[in-house]
Image: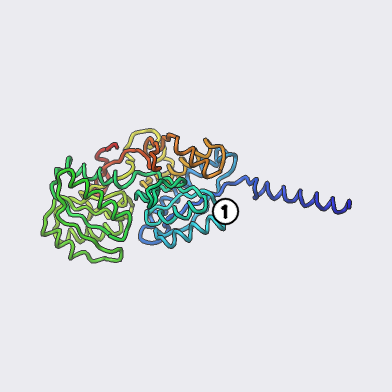
Amino acid sequence: MRTRNLLVLVLVGAMLALSACGGGGSKTLKVAILAPLSGNVATFGQSTRDGATLAIEEWNAKGGVLGKQIQPVVEDSQCNAEAAVSAANKVIDQDGVKFIIGEVCSSASIPISEVAMAKGVLQISPTSTNPSVTVGEDGKTKSLIFRACFIDPFQGQVAAKFALEDLKAKTAAVLLDQGNDYVRGLAEFFRDSFEAGGGKVVVWETYTGEDNDFSAILSKVKDANPDILYVPDYYSKVNLIAAQAREKGITATMMGGDGWDSEDLDRTVTDGAYFTNHYSGDDPRPIVQDWIKKYKDKYGSEPDALATLAYDAANILFTAMEKAGTDDPAKVAAAMEGMEFDVVSGHITYDSKHNPVKPAVILQIKDGEIHFVKTIAP
């Protein structure tokens, strides 16, 4: 009996030691970063990873969150629904994460949100702007899903307002990838706001994500001669469309959305164009300038909006965890709902649908540089 008791004590001691190292009392907190690290928008994923990683390093340097060091679990979700679901299941089921930063693309974040809700995991997307990321088909807010960016209805409204009031546009052509949730949504919101403000959409043409030849639909744009050519797609597709539009002699002012924000955007073929975005490096606020310096010191380049919003998303998440005093996703979500955050992209409060109430900026491409034009508040 004495030998048996001794054996039990030894086993209990071993279990407690294991718990302190990596079990229930773990001193690490795993957080997933899901982003497209390969494919047509790989720069989006790389920036997202780098921005979130920098935030994690800063929190770890000051003691971590809830006394735990944050361990990032990075997966390539490819801006693709199937790959995103696979990545989400992997980090939850195999790595044991309860918090996800990502995805970038709405078409990937929406299916991730369904996985997260089903498995009790909190997701905060840095840059997915489609309303369906945080709201289900039943119209109800997804309790565990948040974002750090404004949404497409606001972005489309801002673009239309600028086109009508600042550019004095009366007509617009809109080209869109019908199969992309982000692109389609932004195009529709721009159209609705532009026409509600007195403008007229004279060309509405769709294409697929696999298309590379846009000569047919651009011929329609050429014939209509609109004031604005609105292309709310990602930078890789914008480069192709803008180059072919120039070849056809189209003189309409090009406009787009935050999907243009990449070092790989061709600033020659898009010269003179405008796009909506989440922040500007020209913002003189100390928090912005400090962020730019930190990012340049670490990565050797200026942060784009993808990196900035990933940094903001991570800081929002960790601040809410500290406020909640726990790593229970439901309690962290409840804390996040009632908080205000001063982050790089602006002062944020959350509305009832878990969307940030925050301003947008208008940027212009000119002579190879991106220039701040103005800020438009909600």
Q: Position of residue 103 (x, y in %)?
A: 42, 53
260 relative to 168 in the view: left or right: right
Colouring scheme applied when the structure was drawn: rainbow
Q: Position of residue 274 (x, y in %)?
A: 23, 47
Q: Amino acid at mark 1?
A: Gly
The part of the image, by quadrant, that contains residue 302 is: top left
- In the rendered image, the vertical position of residue 87 relative to residue 373, given as above or below: below
Q: Position of residue 204 (x, y in %)?
A: 19, 57
The answer to whether residue 131 is seen in the rendering is yes
| Residue positioned 41% across, 39% down in the render | 291
The part of the image, by quadrant, that contains residue 277 is: top left
- Crowding around mark 1 (Cα neighbors within 10 Å: few <14, some 14 to 19, many 20+) is some
Helix, strand or loop at disc 1? loop
Q: Where is the C terminus found, in terms of image quarters?
A: top left
| Residue positioned 52% across, 59% down in the render | 90
Q: Position of residue 288 (x, y in %)?
A: 38, 37
Q: How many marks?
A: 1
